[in-house]
Amino acid sequence: MIMNLHTHTHHSPDAGNTVAERVEAANQAGLRYMAVTDHVEINRYYPAAYYHAVETDEYFYDGRGVFEGSVQETLEEAARCAPLVLLTGAEIGQIPQDIEKSALIYNDPRTDIILGSVHELPGRPDFYFLDYTKEDIPALVTAYFEEVLRLAQTDCYDVLAHLTYGLRYLPNRRAYDITPHLDLIDEVLKTVIRKGKAIELNGSGLRKPQPYIDPDLILVKRYRDLGGKYLTISTDAHDTRFVTFGIDLLEDMARTAGFSKLTVFQKHEPFFVTL
């Protein structure tokens, strides 16, 4: 197994286990590259008190604190993790909502890889918490991809994470027709390609009763056909049990989409590893 470049540890409010536990599991499985990318919700960069708010399951605060704790622990483990190559990073949520602070994280000399994500639209909770019976779903999905495009147009990420996150919790995800959104999705992909960034195959959905991958094979092939060459693989593990879950399926999907190489980032510089 080559890589898992999107993982969360106990520093993320919705995850558990230490970096050392992740490293041990990765080495036991023969993983070659792993990145620790704990959640930095950039629109809640400071503790809740700064915003006169109370932390809840819906809203994570103190992204800066998460980042500092995660980076420190990851760097300590990176010095003793061989043969695994351990990369330092973060998953920045909602980059367009605060590009200045996102740039602080991206330009931190300790980081190797930054994932850019849209988990929520401005002024709204994470897609996980939405009541879809009250939503105009096509309008919601359009708004999601418009926000992803705004993210793609920034320079504060290396990998655009889970491209289709906005579809993840739809009541009947498999039946939803994304055809009306393809022009907008193509614009996202073209922007990623033009900027020399990557997309990921995110396998967190493989653990669901009706398994899925973000994005699906059709969109990954579309990315390839448009000229995309940088592709990463991740399980988006929030628990050590899933640090290598489904990686073989993700590698097979990458090959089916026409990729013979995957991409690793070190100090934000991409390099290829043979698939």
Image: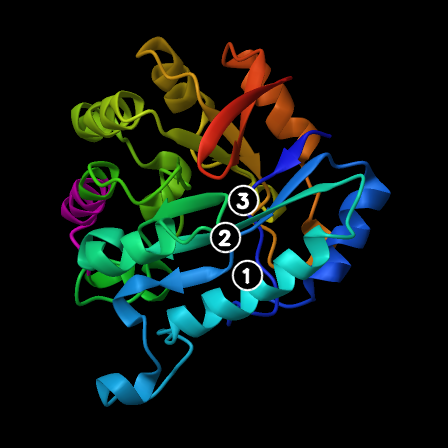
* Mark 1 crowd level (few <14, some 14–19, many ≥20, 10 Å Cα): many
Q: Residue at x 54, y 44 (%)?
A: 205
Name which of mark 3 and mark 2 comes first in the sequence.
Answer: 2
**Element type at marker 3?**
helix
Contact, mark 1 vs mark 3 (Cβ under 8 Å): no
Gap in angstroms between the C-alphas marked 1 and 2: 7 Å
User: Residue 18, position in %: x, y?
Assistant: 69, 66
Q: Tell whether position 142 is magenta.
A: yes
**Span colored in magenta:** 135-148
Name the residue that disc number 2 marks: 110
The quadrant of the picture occupied by the C terminus is top right
- In this view, the residue farthest toward the right is 28
Q: Residue at x 26, y 86 (%)?
A: 50
Q: Amino acid at mark 1?
A: Val
| Vertical position of residue 69 compared to residue 177: above or below | below
Residue 183 left/right relative to 50 = left
Name which of mark 1 and mark 3 comes first in the sequence.
Answer: 1
User: Residue 263, position in %: x, y?
Assistant: 53, 25
Secondary structure mostly taken by the magenta-highlighted segment of the chain: helix
Q: Residue at x 76, y 45 (%)?
A: 26
Name the residue that disc number 1 marks: 71
Contact, mark 1 vs mark 2 (Cβ under 8 Å): yes
Viewer-proximal residue, 229 or 173?
A: 229
Q: Amino acid at mark 3?
A: Gly
Q: Amino acid at mark 2?
A: Arg
User: Residue 28, position in %: x, y?
Assistant: 85, 44
| Vertical position of residue 9 compared to residue 179: above or below | below
